[in-house]
């Protein structure tokens, strides 16, 4: 099996995983109208008891989720509004769509968030709100807390992304700088019923973290946020109003986000309708069909991208040398979400950085091919989903005069792989169930 065929196989396996996370498919599996009822997973709502049905949501996949909901519910939807990423909007008949900034929030996102809060104001107990949330919802649904500006939230988000904070840590601060996240959307909708359908982009599917948990109790506190600030030495870098907001709130001068047992959650439900495991299972099925022995390593890959690369490559090398932990031809699959602590001014994303770090270790290992990509089709602030690397990547780079180590040191993976035509370009996929790593060993 030559390298070109392995590359084609890696892309086919990745594409199969992405397709399994298709948001329309997930919504159609979870939502139905039958027998005079609206069925949301295991939940049942007699249609004649619903005085008003409104739809809200945010995320990279939310436009596709809303289109599917409109196809199912039609004119039963009274009105709605969603926020999605630029380039991800779809034609909708009854739901307003706001395209907004990601990963750094912008004013368009604020306008969409305010519109959603307005649609939730004053609803009766007989009203039903359908929430549609997916990865990216945290940045796409910005509603600065009282006394804060969007620019201050933008700068805080940039600092958190650059310092290597985990998604859980980033979302903890987002919730405590917001008027809509961390259960506050559920509080805005009460006393109406609210059901959130969630496409998970977070390891372990924690409902309080996905899209920063707008309809779910928040277990984190202002004190936790200050601990995160100290952990990454951000106190002096944070905008002064943000620091003052966190410190005053930690002293009890402002109310906390709603916690478990808060009355606003008495009529709120959240259902995970798609996640990384769906994508991994579909990728594994495709790899098996292509003739590979398959080993799923984890759906919880996290930590620094280059360290994750080292772990994946070491297992692949053991497989290539000794047919363990699996016999060849082998496919190793992982999913999750790594991080990158920026120390340079390069262009790239966590998946491209993982692939570049892997390429350095794979030099001279001709039987191994690795693909790392984001299922949303966007890796960092680039138009690539990720990149491919194998045992020939460095020799090809040297022939082009490219120093792979220097590119990695300045986190400049995008131009490196662009020069080799090894970027994985999918365009917006409409879904977001974290990242996939595919490693093939001939």
Image (cartoon, grey):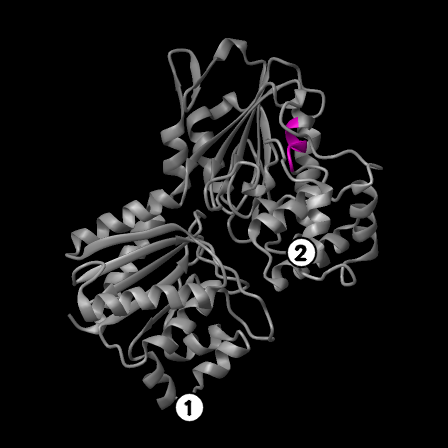
Q: Considering only vertical position in the picture, is 384 above or below 219?
A: below
Quarter of the image with the N terminus in it: bottom left
- Nearer to me, 289 or 252: 252
Instruction: Give percent across and percent down for residue 122.
Output: 71, 20
Q: Residue furthest top?
A: 48
Residue 421 visible (yes or no): no
Residue 437: x, y in percent?
36, 59
Secondary structure found at label 2: helix
Residue found at x 58% / y 19%? 267
- Which sits in the foreground, 92 or 423? 423
Image quadrant where residue 213 sits: top right
Residue displayed at 46% across by 82% down: 405
Question: Which residue is tagged 2?
Answer: 157
Residue at x 21%, y 69% (from the top left corner): 320
Q: Seen in the image, is 306 located left or right of residue 130?
A: left
* Residue 17, position as x, y percentages in the image: 32, 50
Q: Residues within 10 Å of mark 2 (few under 14, many from 20)?
A: many
Q: Residues within 10 Å of mark 1 (few under 14, many from 20)?
A: few
In magenta, the rendered stretch is 182-186
- Could you tell which of marks 2 and 1 lies nearer the N-terminus? 2
Q: Is residue 94 left or right of residue 388?
A: right
Q: Which residue is denoted by mark 1 in the rendering?
A: 401
Quadrant of the image for the C terminus?
bottom left
- 314 left or right, relative to 183: left
Q: Is residue 28 above or below residue 165?
A: above
């Amino acid at each position: 099996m030559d390298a070109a065929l392995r590359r084609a196989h890696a892309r086919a396996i990745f594409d199969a995983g992405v397709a399994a996370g298709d948001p329309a498919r997930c919504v159609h599996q979870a939502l139905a109208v039958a027998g005079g009822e609206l069925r949301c997973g295991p939940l049942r709502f007699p249609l004649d008891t619903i005085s008003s049905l409104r739809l809200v949501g945010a995320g990279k996949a939310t436009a596709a989720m809303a289109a599917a909901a409109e196809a199912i519910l039609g004119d039963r939807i009274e009105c709605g509004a969603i926020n999605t990423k630029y380039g991800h909007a779809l034609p909708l008949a009854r739901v307003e769509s706001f395209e907004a900034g990601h990963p750094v929030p912008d004013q368009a996102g604020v306008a969409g968030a305010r519109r959603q809060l307005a649609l939730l104001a004053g609803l009766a107990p007989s009203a039903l709100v359908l929430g549609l949330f997916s990865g990216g919802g945290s940045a796409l649904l910005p509603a600065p807390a009282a006394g804060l500006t969007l620019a201050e939230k933008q700068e805080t988000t940039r600092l958190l992304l650059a310092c290597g904070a985990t998604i859980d840590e980033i979302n903890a601060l987002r919730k405590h700088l917001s008027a809509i996240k961390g259960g506050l959307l559920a509080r805005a909708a009460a006393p109406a019923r609210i059901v959130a359908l969630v496409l998970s982009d977070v390891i372990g599917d924690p409902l309080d973290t996905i899209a920063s948990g707008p309809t779910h109790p928040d277990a984190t506190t202002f004190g936790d946020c200050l601990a995160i600030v100290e952990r990454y030495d951000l106190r002096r870098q944070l905008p002064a109003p943000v620091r003052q907001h966190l410190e005053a709130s930690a002293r009890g001068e402002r109310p906390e986000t709603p916690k478990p047992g808060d009355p606003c959650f008495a009529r709120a439900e959240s259902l995970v309708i798609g996640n990384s495991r769906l994508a991994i299972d579909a990728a594994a099925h495709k790899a098996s069909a292509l003739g590979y022995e398959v080993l799923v390593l984890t759906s919880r890959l996290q930590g620094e991208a280059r360290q994750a690369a080292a772990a994946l490559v070491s297992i692949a090398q053991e497989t290539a040398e000794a047919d363990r932990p699996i016999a060849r031809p082998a496919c190793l699959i992982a999913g999750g979400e790594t991080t990158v602590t920026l120390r340079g001014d390069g262009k790239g994303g966590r998946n491209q950085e993982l692939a570049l770090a892997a390429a350095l270790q794979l030099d001279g290992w001709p039987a191994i091919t690795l693909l790392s990509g984001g299922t949303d089709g966007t890796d960092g602030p680039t138009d690539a989903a990720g990149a491919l690397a194998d045992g020939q990547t460095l020799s090809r780079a040297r022939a082009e005069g490219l120093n792979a180590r220097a590119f990695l040191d300045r986190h400049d993976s995008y131009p490196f792989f662009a020069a080799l035509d090894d970027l994985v370009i999918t365009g917006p996929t409409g879904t977001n169930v974290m990242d996939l790593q595919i490693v093939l060993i001939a």
